[in-house]
Image (cartoon, rainbow, N blue to C red):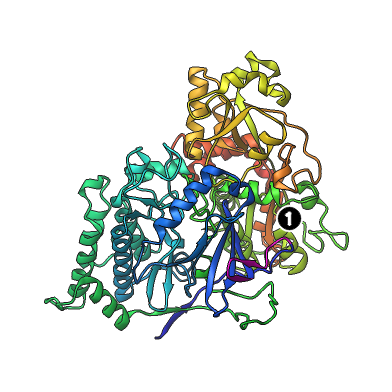
Amino acid sequence: MTNRSSSALPSLKPLAKSDPSRVGKYRLVGRLGTGGMGVVYAGVDRSGRRAAVKLIHNVLAADEEFRARFTREVAILGRIEGACVARVLGADTAAERPWLATEYIPGPTLEDHIQNHGRITSDWLFGLAAGLAEAIVAIHQAGVVHRDLKPSNVILSPDGPRVVDFGISRALDHTAMTRTGLVIGSPGWISPEEYRGEEAGPAADVYSWALLVAHAATGRLPYGTGRPEVLALKVLNNRVDTSTIPHQLGDLVNTALSKNPFERPTAVDVLDGVVEAWRAYDGETASSGVNPVGEVTARLTRTWVMPDHATATWPAKGSPVVVSAYRHWDIAAVISATALIATVVVSQANNDRAAPARKTAEIGVDAGASSPTTAMTTGKTNGTESSAIPQEGTSKPCAPFTVAVNGWVGSEANAALIEYVAGKYLGCRVVKKYMNEERSWQQLDAGKVDAILENWAHPDLKEKYIHQRKTVVSAGLTGTKGVIGWYVPAWMAAKYPDITNWRNLNKYAPLFRSRKSGNQGQLLEGDPSFISNDRALIKNLKLDYKMVYSGSEAALVEAFRKAEKEKTPLLGWFYEPMWLFAELDLVKINLPAHTAGCDYDPAEVACDYPRYQLDKIVSKKFARSGSPAYTLIKKFTWSNNDQNLVASYIVVDKMTPADAAAKWVETNSDKVKEWLPLNA
């Protein structure tokens, strides 16, 4: 089988000292990733069979409700049998820490292939459409709805496309496994009916199938990028571009994209339709006489082209485990490091992780014993982050430069502003690349991105790329301050002045009781995939509260809006900078002050989240280029209020990012002039 192109792959990281050496019958040879619900390891059994082993976090293992859902889910997943799905190899739901092992599948994800090599065409597109349809038929025949079909859950394996990660699947013959009232899925890939609060049945998977085919054919995200609430509006109101899909397949895809689930074909109809369209594309008029599944297999065998991909050197049976930090695994081994049963509820991560989730997980928890501020401003004792970096760009012409845009609207606001100012005052062309935070650093390191305009600390990534690899540098602070914590509407703080002291929260717990929290006060959370310290805080501060998930950041925003409008009590998790603060006044609860190392052990956290001074990161090559654009980025600073205002133009006023930036610049020209090179 020939190879089409190479795809970037993630590194297999060494096991941490705290990691187990074995899980069940699997010897662990490395760490693939960490998600909101657990850690994903590379595992090998005694026969040498490879697997992706997902081990649930301790805090969730102690949650009886979660454990019960997990047990039911594993039983459901065992029903699924199909050539184009990843199989469950084993599990132990009664273990002290439950785990699940899934089949190892070589090959890049559809997401990574498109990001690195663009759209898919010709027979390869038909093969993708057919394989995905076959997988969905197998899933539905097992009585399961996947509910999270997206590019990162599709592997381009040697034998054809494979669907993986049934983390938020649901049995057709069982009540919902996840919390009632939640919109489940990944932003931009959720069906319209789910956003409308309707039941997500098999038709939701058919809709996702159509989105995946459109995405593969165009190389673009069906609904673009943006905050979850923006994507929700697009899903409900906008049409998906299907213009590059071959006409033989286009009508079927458009029908499957109907906003009305009752107008969509069934998965079996889709499979039949794809096979028929494929025949027409190849100029064949008669049926082969083989059942659709058999015909798909035959056609894939004849036409499927496997993308080139790096392969890992697995430890031989019984050999010592020695893992290089830069050894590459096939990306499929990750089988999604996101939650197993995670209700990935309207979370944004530009198809990866929600921005606040990454902020909390990578900053609040991973910061360890040093404060993020120190990590950003002091660098290493053997040299500062900005050493040997020019303070001003020269008079060289401004070549095009690339900025990374991450999955929250504040990042879009930053990029829009730099793009507008660079074009208007310096004559620069800005290329915006949409990706998650970790990929942004990787692309800086590879020279494919020039700047990250808002970095939320990430001391681990700074250590790797600034101090070890020495390929990127800090370009100074953004001026914005990152804050995560618990908030109440301003009217509550005015009516109950002492409520902002955490010691008084139990006194006010009856005000926050809800149907879901019972006799305890409700602490409203956003997306369940967000990794927070809140469960530990409630326990360790002995607060009479229960975490209740709103289901998404968008739902959390609406809850705060309603609390302000109707003057109903609300205590909720939130973060700044965030555009909502340009609309509402929220007051932060004063939890016990954060001190260095107080959040090192997630189970023992009894302190507030740290404050973050956000900074800009650029490639060393860009910093030394003499480009006036580097000077612009280095001098660029603005406040939380500035960013919130531009973000609100985009989200609330529905302005394009370019128009939002232009409006802000019009009233802040003096500030903008301070960012420009002296000779501009």
Residue, x 72% and y 64% (percent of image)? 464
* Residue 149 shown left or right of residue 662 in the figure: left
List the single residue furthest toward the front: 94
Give x and y (percent) for residue 324. Answer: 69, 75
Residue, x 48% and y 42% (percent of image)? 659
Q: Of residues 640 and 205, which is closer to you in this image?
A: 205
Q: Is residue 381 visible?
A: yes
List the single residue furthest toward the left: 286
Residue that carries the numbered disc 1 in the rendered image: 459
Q: Is residue 149 visible?
A: no
Residue 20 belongs to the span the image colors magenta? yes
The residue segment tinted magenta is: 18-28
Q: Name above or below for residue 451 compared with residue 299.
A: above
Give x and y (percent) for residue 262. Answer: 22, 46
* Residue 470 shown left or right of residue 526 in the figure: right
List the single residue furthest toward the top: 495
Q: Give amino acid for label 1.
A: Pro
Residue, x 78% and y 43% (percent of image)? 598
* Residue 631 shown left or right of residue 119 in the figure: right
Classify the position of the N terminus by image quarter: bottom left
Q: Name above or below for residue 394 compared with residue 511.
A: below
| Residue 246 lies in quadrant | bottom left
